[in-house]
Image (cartoon, helix red, strand yellow):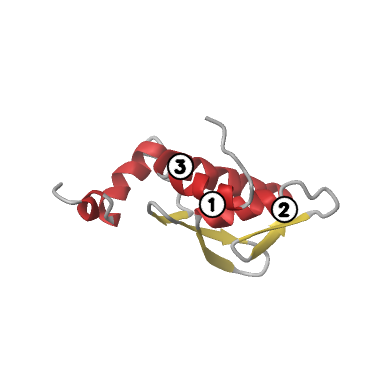
Amino acid sequence: MNTLQEKYSRTNYPDKLGEFYGWDIPDYILQAGKSFIKIRVSDWRAEQDLNITPKDVIEYYCKWSGNVTSGCRVIAGYAGDWRPVDRLVKECLEWFLFINIEALRREGRKYGLTLKE
């Protein structure tokens, strides 16, 4: 790998994704990179593909995760029951901690958050 662009190209992420999931990548994970993870969700309405970014994850934790008055949570424009949405966001958080912790830190600072070491 000669350049940073080659090092961080999407073509290198299937190996990282495999490493992250122990080479058993779930079917709902469609694609992933340094700044996104594309996930297929489905509910009673239909299937939908979500492109979740570090910003979406940070916004979720700032706006939705502490909301105990609603059974509904929102991530990247998708609204659903708080339990599966919360699990989905935790999985995305773990991906970004694994692949691009700096993006999470950068977005978190915008909201006054500090990631634990």
Residue lying farthest to the left in this orientation: 2
The CA span between labels 2 and 3 is 21 Å
Q: Position of residue 28 (x, y in %)?
A: 48, 54
Label 2 or label 1, whichever lies nearer to me, is 1
Instruction: Name the residue tied to disc 2.
Output: 64
Helix, strand or loop at label 3? It is helix
Q: Is 59 or 81 nearer to us in this picture?
A: 59
Image quarter for residue 24? Answer: top left
The three-letter amino acid code for the residue at tag 3 is Ile
Residue lying farthest to the top in this orientation: 117
First in sequence: mark 1 vs mark 3: 3
Q: Which mark is residue 101?
A: 3
Q: Position of residue 114 (x, y in %)?
A: 59, 39
Label 2 or label 3, whichever lies nearer to me, is 3
Instruction: Name the residue tied to disc 1.
Output: 107
Point 40% across, 38% down: residue: 20
The CA span between labels 1 and 3 is 10 Å
Helix, strand or loop at label 1? It is helix
Specify few, some or many for label 2: CA neighbours under 10 Å numbering under 14, 14-19, or 20 or more: some
Image position of 69 with respect to 23: above or below: below
Q: Position of residue 60 (x, y in %)?
A: 65, 53
The CA span between labels 2 and 1 is 16 Å
Point 23% across, 55% down: residue: 5
